[in-house]
Amino acid sequence: MTGDPDVAGDASSLLVVIDMQRIFGDPESPWFTPGYAGIVPNVDRLVAAFGDRVVFTRFLVPDDPRGSWAAYYERFPQVARPEARPLFALTEPWAGRQPSTLDEPTFSKWGPALRTRAGPAETLVLAGVATDCCVIGTALPAADAGMFVRVVGDACAGIDDAAHERALAICAGFAPQIVVTTVEEELRT
């Protein structure tokens, strides 16, 4: 495949499931993403369709936050405590499957580790949370690095619907490097 962003379900793309973790799905969490539960079925459909071409990312708190991250965790000290560590696990239906994971202490998941995971793929397909933070934070630097990126809008959720839609609109403005698709488009053969 050419990595063409308009080719849904091409065999060379890598599905990157961003941060489908308890900390974003738990209503008691300070980082709760309200649309989280609603996208689980769509994300799982994508996971099934992409088979072994899937990596799950997990946002983790660094052991020693520095710079702006130190200030960030001063704002959210409850997530940096040892007793919060279980919140960083993947949620079901994926936790029990023990999928391939990539852990990063940053909003963006793009970098050498994800580039290596992509292998010869020229296209990343992004799903997960939050559209207005980690998803867009991954899409932009990946496109800058020369990857085609497809953001699956109905398999992502933001901090609220308005933030989700704004992030998708920003992504769409980067076509052809970044395009916004749907689950049905991705599953098309």
Image (cartoon, rainbow, N blue to C red):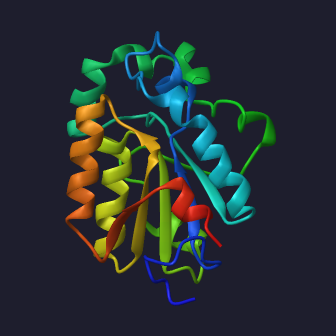
The image shows residue 91 at horizontal and vertical percentages of: 64, 30
Residue at the image position 51 percent from the left and 78 percent from the top: 7
Left or right, 153 with respect to 52, comes to left
Furthest residue to the right? Answer: 97
Residue at the image position 47 percent from the left and 27 percent from the top: 24
Query: Does residue 87 show up?
Result: yes
Left or right, 107 with respect to 95, comes to left
Residue at the image position 37 percent from the left and 46 percent from the top: 134
Position of residue 119 relative to residue 161, above or below, is below
Position of residue 14 relative to residue 105, above or below, is below
Q: Nearer the viewer, residue 137 or 34?
A: 34
The image shows residue 168 at horizontal and vertical percentages of: 28, 51
Pick the quarter of the image with the C terminus.
Answer: bottom right
Occupied quadrant, residue 90: top right
Pick the quarter of the image with the N terminus.
Answer: bottom right
The image shows residue 9 at horizontal and vertical percentages of: 60, 71
Furthest residue to the top? Answer: 28
Query: Does residue 100 show up?
Result: no
Position of residue 127 relative to residue 122, above or below, is above
Occupied quadrant, residue 162: top left
